Image: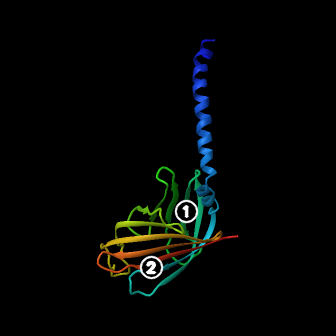
Amino acid sequence: MKKILLILPFLCLATPQVYCQAQADGAFYKTEQSRWLTKKTGTWDVTMTLQPTIDAKSIIIKGLEAERTMVGAFCLHEVVRPTKGAPMPAFQRNADLDYNYNDARWDYMAIDTRITGGIMFFSNMPDVKDSIVSYMLNTVHPGFGTEQTDRGKNLRVKNVIIAIGPNHDMVKQYWKLTDGNEWLAVTYDYVKRK
C-alpha cells in the first residue's frame, strides 16, 4: 500500500507531462516545413558539376546517389556517396537541412570527406521566398589538383537550395575568394528514383 501511495503522485505528475510532450512533438509533424521535408526522403540520383576556379572548365561527375531520411519531424539527413561500382574513390558527404522553429529559419550544415574543411555551417537568409539561401562567410579554400590551386585562401560560399519539382532538386554553390569575383563553383542536381 505504501508503494502505491508513493507511486500515485509521481504518475499524476508524469502522465500530463508525457501527454503534453507527445502533443507538442506531434504538432511538428503537421507543419508545412515538416511535410515538405518528409516528401524529400528516399534515394536520389545525383549529378555534380564542379568548376574549381573562376576560369576553369566545368567537370561533370555522374554515378552519385543520395540517401535521404528524416531525423524526427524537422530535419532531413542526407548521405551522398558514389553508386556501387562507380569508377571513383569512395567518399561520403553528409548534410542536414532542418527548419529551426525557435528562430523561424532554415539551418544547413554539411561535412564532406573529400575536403579537409571540417563541418561547414551555413547561415540562412529567411527573407528569400523562392529558394533556401544560406551563406558560409568564412572558410578556407580546399585547393584543387596536384598544384593545390588556391588552397588556404579565404572563401565565401552562397548555398542555394532549389525545389524544381516534387522529384527534382538542385543545390548551387557560388564561391568567392576574398580578392575575386563570385562564380558558380558547384551544382548538385538531384532526381528522385522511382
Q: Nearer the viewer, residue 37 or 47?
A: 37
In the rendered view, would you say 194 is above or below 20? below
Q: Earlier in the sequence, mark 1 or mark 2?
A: 1
Q: Quadrant of the N terminus?
A: top right
Q: Quadrant of residue 12?
A: top right
In the rendered view, would you say 5 is above or below 163? above
Q: Is residue 134 left or right of residue 154?
A: right
In the rendered view, would you say 54 is above or below 95? below
Q: Is residue 35 left or right of residue 94?
A: right
Q: Nearer the viewer, residue 53 or 137?
A: 137
Q: Which residue is mark 1?
A: 78
> Residue 138, image x and y in percent?
33, 66
The residue carrying pointer 2 sits among few (fewer than 14), some (14 to 19) or many (20 or more) residues within 10 Å by Cα, namely: some
Q: Residue at x 43, y 75 (%)?
A: 174
What kind of element bears circle 2? strand
Q: Quadrant of the C terminus?
A: bottom right
Q: Quadrant of residue 130?
A: bottom right
Q: Is residue 47 left or right of residue 53?
A: right
Q: Residue at x 63, y 66 (%)?
A: 43
Q: Which residue is mark 2?
A: 184
